[in-house]
């Protein structure tokens, strides 16, 4: 039998079958046929009309069950058939714009959205109900894929009434399939619409899904491909988020910056810097063992990580170097953390392990080294910031952090090609940036070295040494220090 005739014959049996069980077997056959592109391409409107009739009948039956609990006992077979019809429609849409357009013109999107909303109201633990729900969402996702007209139709019908209950549903697959539809339908204009107060809950629900289901690919893609590209939306979300949710958002931002997508965040860097400045000293509370899970402080740790990555990007460094008070906030916080570690034994107290085997899990581990990294980046080729650190007495502070501290492990910066020596401390990099083409800072360090306030071995690590010339102390370079 020719392929078009085969489809018509199967579809005809679907319309003639009286009992749900007979329809189900035929629908399964049709679902199998639509797995192949050649059958999808030969489908006609008549094939989908019979599926439309089943959806219409199922809607009436589910509607009755919503009003009469006793009808639930007879609903299971109909729900199984409904699921198979959605699978059939879902398969027929795959890479087939013709079928997508036919279904849309027939009103299958309207019928499906309405049926899904009815299923939402159905108070039952029947697995067949959940399956039908999931399959319906999969169909909407497939009919929208690559089809702007279908996306527009779904958005008008489903936003926001369908999305909110699905994103907050107890079933993980329903959340995932709903996220697929939302991702597919979003564009810059619709993303901006989420900024409105009455629609912001949609964006917040997506972020909650990321937190609840970290393996959710579609929720992650919504955040990274749409939400994070709208700075005003991110600011509005941030104001409404709990501290735990803010941490999730910042981790997503950090992952995107690390993947070299930092250009997206050019309009967001000043906002994140202001958030850090406002609350940065809350991290000092982590010095108390009882405050190791302080959620506000944990947010600041992620903000600091984010700013460190942003200032490592040439495109954002200049803006953040000019950010009012960011450098001062970093230096002041470093001073307080360093003082806290000297006044009492806590996570900010330098620890010199002999074996290197100690495992420290405190959330503030590395905080001081990250602050120094931020200071170093902000001073890179920037004399105004070099001078500002001098005025804040930051240079002796950074020199005092040049010793090895297992509570603040520093990233290995690079290996010199000449001698393969590893610079293991951000403080070394900071001293290089603070002294580069800055005579006053060089003179300060030279005087400190002569007074015995600086270990000469520390200067050697930075590629510097102190010499006397014409009764004047000079800090000279003995090798080229690498850029970060």
Image (spheres, rainbow, N blue to C red):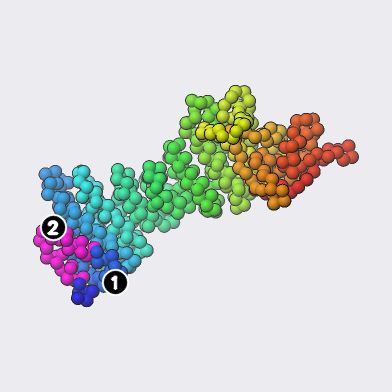
Q: Residue furthest bottom?
A: 2
Relative vertical location of residue 459 with respect to residue 218 in this rendering, above or below? above
Relative vertical location of residue 240 with respect to residue 339 in this rendering, above or below? below
For the residue pair 154 and 53, the one nearer the viewer reads as 53
Question: Quick check: can you spot residue 381?
Answer: no
Residue 116 image point, x, y percent: 25, 52
Residue 294 image point, x, y percent: 48, 31
Q: Residue furthest front?
A: 355
For the residue pair 251 and 101, the one nearer the viewer reads as 251
Q: Is residue 403 magenta?
A: no
Which residues lie in the magenta part? Answer: 7-31
Residue at 14 percent across and 46 percent down: it is 72
Relative vertical location of residue 118 with respect to residue 39 in this rendering, above or below? above
Q: Residue furthest left?
A: 18
Residue at 78 percent across and 30 percent down: it is 452
Q: Residue furthest right?
A: 470
Asked whether, in this view, residue 116 is left or right of residue 68, the answer is: right
User: CB of mark 2 within 8 Å of CB of mark 1?
Assistant: no
Asked whether, in this view, residue 474 is left or right of residue 354, the answer is: right
Q: How many marks?
A: 2
Quarter holding the N terminus?
bottom left
Q: Is residue 13 magenta?
A: yes
The residue to which callout 1 is attached is 38
Residue 455, quarter of the rendered image: top right
Residue 476, quarter of the rendered image: top right
Residue neighbourhood size for the residue with mark 1, other residues' Cα within 10 Å, grouped as few (<14), some (14–19), many (≥20):
few
Question: Quick check: can you spot residue 17?
Answer: yes
- Indicate which disc residue 21 carries: 2
Residue 68 image point, x, y percent: 13, 45
Give the dominant element type of the magenta stretch: helix, strand or loop: helix
Badge 2 or badge 1: first in the primary sequence: 2
Residue at 53 percent across and 34 percent down: it is 359
């Amino acid at each position: 039998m020719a392929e078009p005739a085969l489809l018509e014959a199967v579809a005809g049996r679907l319309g003639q079958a009286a009992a749900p069980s007979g329809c189900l077997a035929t629908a399964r056959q049709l679902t199998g046929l639509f797995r192949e592109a050649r059958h999808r391409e030969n489908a006609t409107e008549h094939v989908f009309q019979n599926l439309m009739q089943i959806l219409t009948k199922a809607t009436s039956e589910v509607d009755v069950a919503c009003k009469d609990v006793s009808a639930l006992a007879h609903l299971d077979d109909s729900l199984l058939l409904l699921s198979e019809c959605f699978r059939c429609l879902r398969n027929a849409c795959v890479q087939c714009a013709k079928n997508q357009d036919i279904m849309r013109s027939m009103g299958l999107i309207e019928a499906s959205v309405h049926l899904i909303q009815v299923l939402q109201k159905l108070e039952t633990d029947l697995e067949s109900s959940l399956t039908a729900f999931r399959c319906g969402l999969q169909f909407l996702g497939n009919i929208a894929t690559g089809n702007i007209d279908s996306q527009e139709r779904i958005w008008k019908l489903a936003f926001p009434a369908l999305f909110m209950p699905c994103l907050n549903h107890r079933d993980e697959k329903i959340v995932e399939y709903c996220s697929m539809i939302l991702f597919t339908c979003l564009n810059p204009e619709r993303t901006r619409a989420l900024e409105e107060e009455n629609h912001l809950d949609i964006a917040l629900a997506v972020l909650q899904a990321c937190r609840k289901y970290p393996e959710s690919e579609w929720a992650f893609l919504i955040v990274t491909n749409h939400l994070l590209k709208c700075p005003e939306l991110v600011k509005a979300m941030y104001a409404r988020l709990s501290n735990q949710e803010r941490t999730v958002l910042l981790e997503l931002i950090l992952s995107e910056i690390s993947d070299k997508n930092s250009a997206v965040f050019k309009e967001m860097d000043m906002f994140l810097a202001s958030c850090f400045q406002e609350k940065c000293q809350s991290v000092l509370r982590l010095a108390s063992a009882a405050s190791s899970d302080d959620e506000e402080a944990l947010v600041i740790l992620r903000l600091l990580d984010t700013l460190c990555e942003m200032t490592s990007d040439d495109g954002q460094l200049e803006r953040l170097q000019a950010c009012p008070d960011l450098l001062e906030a970093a230096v002041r916080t470093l001073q307080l953390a360093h003082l806290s570690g000297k006044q009492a034994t806590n996570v900010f107290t330098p620890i010199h392990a002999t074996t290197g085997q100690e495992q420290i899990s405190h959330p503030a581990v590395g905080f001081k080294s990250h602050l120094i990294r931020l200071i170093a980046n902000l001073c890179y080729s920037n004399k105004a910031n070099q001078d500002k650190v001098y005025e804040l007495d930051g240079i002796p502070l950074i020199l005092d952090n040049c010793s090895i501290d297992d509570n603040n492990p520093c990233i290995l910066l690079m290996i010199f090609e000449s001698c393969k020596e590893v610079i293991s401390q951000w403080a070394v990099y900071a001293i290089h940036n603070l002294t580069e083409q800055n005579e006053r800072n060089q003179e300060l360090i030279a005087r400190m070295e002569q007074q015995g306030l600086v270990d000469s071995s520390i200067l050697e690590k930075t590629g510097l040494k102190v010499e006397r010339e014409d009764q004047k102390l000079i800090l000279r370079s003995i090798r080229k220090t690498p850029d970060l």
